[in-house]
Amino acid sequence: MAATLCSKLLPKQGWVPLTQSVRHGSKAVTRHRKPLHIQKQKLLAVTQYIPPAREFPPGAYPSHTKHVQEDNDLTLLMKRELKKLFEDCKMIAVVQNSSSSAEDMMTLRHRLYKHNITVKFFPNKVVRSFLSDSIYCNMGPLFVGPTVMFVSKEPKVKEMLTTLRGSPQMTLLGACVDNTLLSAQGIVSYSKLPSMTVIQGEVVSGLSMLTSHTAYLLQRHPAHLSQLLQQYIKQQSSDGSAEAAPKAEEAT
Amino acid sequence: MAAPSKATVVLKAVKKITVQFCPFESNVRSTREFLALVGSEKARTTNMNCEVITVVKHDKSEPVVDITYVDGEKLLMKGANLTSSEMLSAFQSRCVAKDPQAKVGEKK
């Protein structure tokens, strides 16, 4: 390069150039870090980035504005399916599985399908954002970690409990039966409830018991009086018959 | 949540693990994750005699993990303010301390 420079800048012989290139042995692209030109060094030093001074670290306080992400189409599809599910099915149970194997899942699904209970998987984020909008917002904290949903049209709680007892790693967290949120103990007590006809009979008998008690109280006094009168008549008749008998005996 | 250092959990020195929590509380996330790690198939195949019992309650109590070792020692972890990785590291350090020979044998 020095040779070419010299040939251009020295048209006449013996003419010393005004500027001379710095003699360096390396090319533009080197394996080692080439020392920067002093001008470039100065420029970089002057234009160095100085970040604004923060009073507190960035993660210390929660931010004012919440970053709301727009739902992509898959999320919308899943939300629509969830909405339909919540409208159709009377019973929705949430179960945590600490990773059962594929065969266990197959057996469980088969057993549940016999009772018309389907097993559904949805991503937790989608479910939680859907629930926070709908009326079932209190179910939100259930959907943490590996969760599975059991849904069915009829609230068949007893069968579900017996099936779940067969697989030890499934933990029943809660259920929404007939738009009522139930805990684990609530589900157990729900399964122990008697059928509707029995309960209706009990309610009717309980209500009619009050009215019958009132009627009994009202009729108590005249009933007592009539009893006393009857007793009196009996006594009179027995005295009368007792008197009549010795009179008859005297007569005869 | 950062994944724990070792993927598998060795339960050789453990007799029983009882995990109890209330799912409607907001501080049970770490306990549930710990349960998912400990109750997985891989962990259970390391020791078939070890029982993992889950109790789901609804009385706003704290999430608690109770571990009973084979030599009778008990480890009680209250997971309300712990992360799952902390709980796992505490649990595994004690497991390794109790059963170093088995661990070394496995590593080799």
Image (spheres, coloured by chain):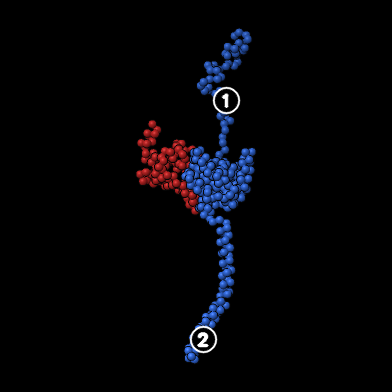
Q: Going from the N terminus, do you reach mark 1 or mark 2 first?
A: 1
Q: Nearer the viewer, residue A15 or A34?
A: A34
**Residue shown at the point (56%, 72%) measured from the top left:** A216
Q: Chain of mark 2?
A: A
Q: Nearer the viewer, residue B79 or B108?
A: B108
How far is disc 1 from disc 2 in space, using C-alphas? 143 Å
Kind of residue sitting beneath label 2: Gly
Report the number of discs: 2
Chain letter matching colour red = B
- A189 is higher (above) or lower (below) than A223: above
Kind of residue sitting beneath label 1: Lys
List x then y, in percent, for residue B28: 50, 47
Assign a secondary structure to mark 2.
Answer: helix
List x then y, in percent, for residue A123: 57, 41
Chain letter matching colour blue = A
- Tag 1 and tag 2, C-beta contact below 8 Å: no
Assign a secondary structure to mark 1.
Answer: helix
- Can you identify the residue that label 2 sits on? A240
Mark 2 residue crowding within 10 angstroms, few (<14) / some (14–19) / many (20+):
few
Question: Given this view, does label 1 or label 2 mark the residue nearer the observer?
Answer: 2
Q: Are labels 1 and 2 assigned to the same chain?
A: yes
**Residue shown at the point (57%, 42%) measured from the top left:** A120
Judge whether residue B55 can be spotted in this image: yes
List x then y, in percent, for residue A50: 56, 34
- Can you identify the residue that label 1 sits on? A40
- A85 is higher (above) or lower (below) than A215: above
Q: Chain of mark 1?
A: A
